[in-house]
């Protein structure tokens, strides 16, 4: 997994870590049961505060992406976990909302939109 | 014991300067930055902790030991780095070890020579032949050789080049990595602490302005920018510090007071911003 | 005791680079002894000179701001002070022994005879003078630092002059006690040692008190 911390993005560092861990899990870069780098080692390597990493990991745990086992490290929960599934569904919904509003602008009918989705699904199967 | 340093209601009066009721706690395993402009009382606090000055009031505990009643026990696990070295100029590095090691039961000669090698300090050199950065590393090497649990650094980066400052921060984050060591680091160069510090204690004119998590401090403030006509009297009241110029203003506000400023340009504050704007609030009424 | 010894050793390591200078100050009194053909003169000067070098530790620590090192070492302030007195007494003792060997040798070479009484007399006066100088000096250095503290060196000089003035006023015959002490080597030595010990005890207590209250 790679982590890139930007000092000028204006996004707090713990938020940057969270987002990048999340997308690594979603993209499959981080598999279930894999451990995240140790909190203190990560802080040392990124030259950031231990508390900042602690906050990122704690919030990831609260959101159901990882599980922190005292003394053993921070484990990634499977993509099948309920919460992660909810998060993914939420993401799909958001993207679909975007598609719907784009369809409205383009004057696309509901049928045409369904048709478009079927075509894309077929293409994905063929690949 | 989870708190490596506890400072409670510490006060000290000098002619023309007063340190007033300072309280903060540094837990085991973290780096705390002690910040504030020059003359705000950082060095006084450190000298009080070391029992080099007598407090008017208050108490200090180093690794659970009272710093006066149990001075020896308190100092056995304490390492200190000042802005300049405290060894005799004429000493060779090997003599530094000979003179200082006797006082620490758990001094490890092998560790000392390993660290010297790591820091590229030649044992045959005299203290006066070392650069400022090297002298700082020599003081660190001593503290690491008896495995000091708490490290106190007083303005260690003043007069150091950026490379040495970066090296120091790396050494410190390595030092606390195992979770068994803590660092109190005083500096007026807040950039040093922007990333690596876990906690910040901010002293302003001898008074405690803030002590807590660094992220809390930074999240607690925002910089707002706008044209001069956009600053109503209502808004002025919420401002902690401001810089006016011909084409507009820049000001520091608390994040909780941000709402009325929403139409203006808002950006996150750096530690420098917070110190600079809160240390010259007088300018607001100029 | 252990910490006192470590502290004394730290003081030795401070003056180590200046050992040559200190040795040089020991040669000059030899000349005084030779010119005056007197063991008493030589030893007196030697002990006064070595007493002056005790200021070295203070000026070296001041020059390097080493009060900060003393401030962080895990050692009691009283041990630090006693360590410095121990260092100083050892220096004095070495100077006394060296002088008591070197001076009679020179004098014998010059054809003088040095009697046992002369020897003990000179040793007693040497110890007395060294103690007199240092008991005032050290608290002075602790209180005022290595430059201003030097003023305290002149207290014994002034005291000495006053004593000399008084002594001429007292007819020796009337003070039998003084007479007996001065003319008995054993009593003289005993008197000097007890007197020195008492002065040192007082001086150490004062120095500890000064250092404990000192703000650095």
Image: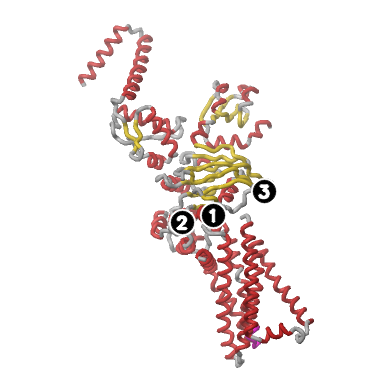
Q: Which residues are magenta?
A: C36-40
Say the numbered circle drawn on residue B142: 2
Q: Main secondary structure of the magenta part?
A: helix
Residue C43 image position (x, y, % from top left): 62, 81
What distance separates the C-alpha of mark 3 from that of mark 1?
24 Å
Per the image, the residue denoted by label 1 is B71
Within-10-Å neighbours for mark 1: few <14, some 14–19, many 20+:
many
Residue C110 vs B188, above or below: the answer is below
Say the numbered circle drawn on residue A76: none
The reply to whether residue B267 is visible in this rendering is yes
Residue B225 sits in which quadrant?
top right
Q: Within the magenta stretch, is there residue B35? A: no
Per the image, the residue denoted by label 3 is B14
* Secondary structure at numbered mark 1: helix
Of the two numbered discs 3 and 1 on the same chain, state the one appearing first in sequence.
3
What distance separates the C-alpha of mark 2 from that of mark 3?
33 Å
A18 horizontally vs B13: left or right: left
Residue B252 image position (x, y, % from top left): 58, 30
Q: Nearer the viewer, residue A47 or B179?
A: B179
Dot in front, 1 or 2: 1
* Secondary structure at numbered mark 2: helix
Of the two numbered discs 2 and 3 on the same chain, state the one appearing first in sequence.
3
């Amino acid at each position: 997994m790679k982590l890139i911390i930007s000092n000028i993005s204006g996004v707090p560092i713990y938020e940057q870590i969270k987002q990048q861990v999340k997308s690594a899990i979603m993209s499959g870069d981080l598999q279930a049961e894999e451990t995240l780098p140790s909190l203190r080692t990560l802080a040392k390597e990124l030259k950031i505060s231990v508390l900042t990493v602690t906050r990122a990991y704690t919030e990831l745990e609260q959101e159901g992406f990882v599980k922190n086992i005292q003394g053993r490290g921070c484990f990634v929960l499977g993509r099948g976990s309920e919460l992660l599934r909810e998060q993914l569904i939420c993401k799909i919904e958001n993207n679909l909302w975007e598609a719907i509003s784009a369809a409205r602008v383009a004057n696309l009918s509901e049928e045409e939109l369904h048709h478009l989705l079927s075509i894309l699904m077929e293409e994905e199967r063929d690949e | 014991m989870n708190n490596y340093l506890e400072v409670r209601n510490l006060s000290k009066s000098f002619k023309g300067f007063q340190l007033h009721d300072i309280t903060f706690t540094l837990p085991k395993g973290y780096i705390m930055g002690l910040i504030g402009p020059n003359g705000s009382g950082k060095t006084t606090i450190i000298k009080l902790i070391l029992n080099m000055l007598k407090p008017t009031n208050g108490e200090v505990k180093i690794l659970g030991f009272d710093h006066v009643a149990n001075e020896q026990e308190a100092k056995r696990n304490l390492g200190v780095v000042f802005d300049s070295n405290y060894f005799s100029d004429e000493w060779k590095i090997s003599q530094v070890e000979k003179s200082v090691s006797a006082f620490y039961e758990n001094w490890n000669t092998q560790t000392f020579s390993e660290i010297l090698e790591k820091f590229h300090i030649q044992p045959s050199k005299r203290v006066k032949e070392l650069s400022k950065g090297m002298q700082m590393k020599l003081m660190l090497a001593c503290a690491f050789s008896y495995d000091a649990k708490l490290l106190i650094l007083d303005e260690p980066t003043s007069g150091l080049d950026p490379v040495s400052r970066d090296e120091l921060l790396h050494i410190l984050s390595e030092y606390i990595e195992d979770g068994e060591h803590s660092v109190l680091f005083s500096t007026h160069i807040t950039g040093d602490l922007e990333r690596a510090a876990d906690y910040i204690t901010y002293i302003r004119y001898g008074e405690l302005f803030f002590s807590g998590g660094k992220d809390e401090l930074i999240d607690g403030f925002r910089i707002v920018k706008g044209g001069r006509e956009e600053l109503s009297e209502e808004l002025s009241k919420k401002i902690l510090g401001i810089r006016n110029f011909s084409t507009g203003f820049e000001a520091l506000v608390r994040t909780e007071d941000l709402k009325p400023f929403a139409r203006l340009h808002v950006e996150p504050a750096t530690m420098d911003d917070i110190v600079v704007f809160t240390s010259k609030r007088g300018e607001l009424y100029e | 005791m252990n910490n006192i010894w470590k502290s004394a050793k730290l003081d030795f390591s401070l003056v180590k680079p200046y050992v040559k200078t200190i040795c040089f100050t020991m040669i000059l009194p030899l000349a005084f002894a030779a010119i005056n053909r007197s063991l008493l003169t030589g030893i007196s000067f030697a002990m006064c000179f070595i007493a002056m070098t005790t200021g070295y530790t203070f000026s070296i620590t001041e020059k390097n701001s080493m009060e900060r090192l003393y401030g962080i070492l895990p050692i009691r302030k009283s041990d630090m002070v006693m360590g410095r007195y121990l260092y100083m007494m050892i220096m004095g003792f070495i100077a006394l022994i060296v002088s008591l060997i070197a001076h009679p040798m020179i004098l014998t070479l010059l054809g003088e005879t040095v009697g046992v009484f002369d020897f003990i007399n000179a040793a007693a006066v040497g110890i007395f003078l060294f103690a007199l100088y240092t008991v005032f000096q050290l608290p002075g250095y602790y209180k005022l630092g290595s430059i201003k503290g030097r003023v305290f060196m002149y207290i014994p000089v002034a005291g000495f002059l006053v004593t000399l003035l008084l002594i001429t006023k007292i007819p020796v015959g009337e003070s039998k006690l003084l007479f007996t002490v001065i003319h008995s080597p054993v009593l003289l030595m005993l008197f000097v040692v007890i007197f020195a010990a008492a002065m040192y005890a007082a001086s150490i207590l004062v120095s500890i008190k000064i250092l404990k209250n000192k703000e650095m």
